[in-house]
Image (spheres, coloured by chain):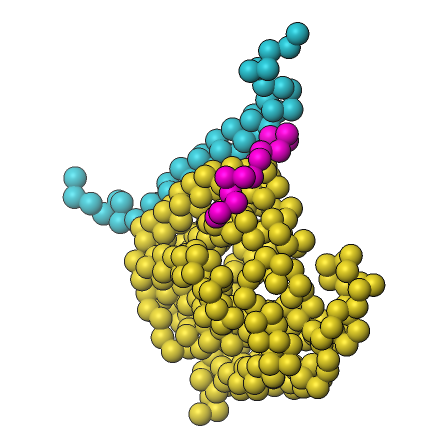
Chain colours: A cyan, B yellow
Amino acid sequence: MSDPSRESEVEAKARRGRNIALALGLILFVILVFVVTIVRLGGNVLERPF
Amino acid sequence: MAMLEALTPSKAPARWQDFLQLLKPRVMSLVVFTALTGLVCAPTPIHPVLGAVAVLCIAVGAGASGALNMWWDADIDAKMRRTRGRPVPAGKIQPSDAAALGVVLSMFSVMLMGMALNWLAAGLLAFTIIFYAVIYTMWLKRWTAQNIVIGGLAGALPPVIGWAAADGAAPLNAWLLCLIIFMWTPPHFWALSLYTSEDYAKAGVPMMPVVRGPATTRRQIWIYSLLLVPICVAPAFTGLGGLAYLAVSFLGGLVFLLLAWRLYRSKAGEAADPRNDDGLYDVRAGALDARNLFAFSILYLALLFATLLGEHLAGLKPLELL
């Protein structure tokens, strides 16, 4: 007999899809913040006093 | 909200596409288009990456308010043919998950807009989301036949947000773009509701044809159309639109008025033909005029914004008629 608490293959596939989508969203967000930071700072990064 | 607890989860587990559907991608694409037009029309040039981020923030903000709308309106959505397949009433996504997605995306989009662009644009975006989710969805929609008139402000604001993102200000020309969409919304939606009013009546939503009747609705559509067309032509006189815009807005406006007049004189929205009950968008006898105006209203707004966008991207000078 199958364990009702275990997720079915369809459920596992759906959960995997959701997890991958979330991971991709987070990675894209990190890249976005990085790119925005570079664009906003522009050449000013190199002009700071050392 | 009353029947949300009664919604039973379907057998099918939620897929990521269901969450995407919560963001109303089709509405999102319209918002992106009008916001981009506001952004491009602003006199201050913007770095393309920051421009893309601004449009993304507006799109995600619009999606967030769509998710909040689907969370709150699941009981209404379940009763209407057009909306019963949405993820929450279909039982694919739990209401609390839809609400959580809406809140999180709202915060992300507003904060990113503030940090990447400016806080005026972020404030306008936050106002738009709250206006749509709280003022329109939670209050106006179930309370008054003027729901889509006042609530239309939320759909009209994206060009102002886009303009503010580029310029750091929201001058009169930006608000003129907002006014165009604001005045366009009532004839557009009421034309649609003239041939889908039974669904709204069943769900208890006080749309104009349900509450005031089709004759009043047709008269209001005609009055709004008369006010709309001069407002659509106005950008040609305020240093925003060029010759192409003047031609498109004027000639398109004439067609709009012709279709609105035909609708006013028609019997659209009157007694239903029982033979057509099965199809959601089946046209009842006499309601062809309503469908014509509805279809043309979409084309007209798209043409207006596309022309403005094209003129500004091509660097064409606006007319100086005043």
User: x%, y% of residue A33?
Assistant: 37, 42
**Residue at figure coordinates x 57%, y 71% from the top left:** B211
Q: Is residue B3 magenta?
A: yes
Question: Is residue B292 visible in the rendered structure shown here?
Answer: no
Q: Which segment did they paint magenta? A: B1-16
Q: Quadrant of the N terminus of chain A?
A: top right
Horizontal side of B65 relative to B264 (left or right) equals left
**Residue at (37%, 65%) from the top-left corner?**
B164
Q: Residue furthest left?
A: A49
Dominant SS type (magenta) = loop
**Residue B274: x and y, percent?**
80, 64
Quadrant including the C terminus of chain A = top left
Residue B189 falls left or right of residue B155: right
Above or below residue B187? Residue B203 is: above
B258 in the magenta segment: no
Q: Residue furthest right?
A: B275
Residue at 59% over, 57% down? B203
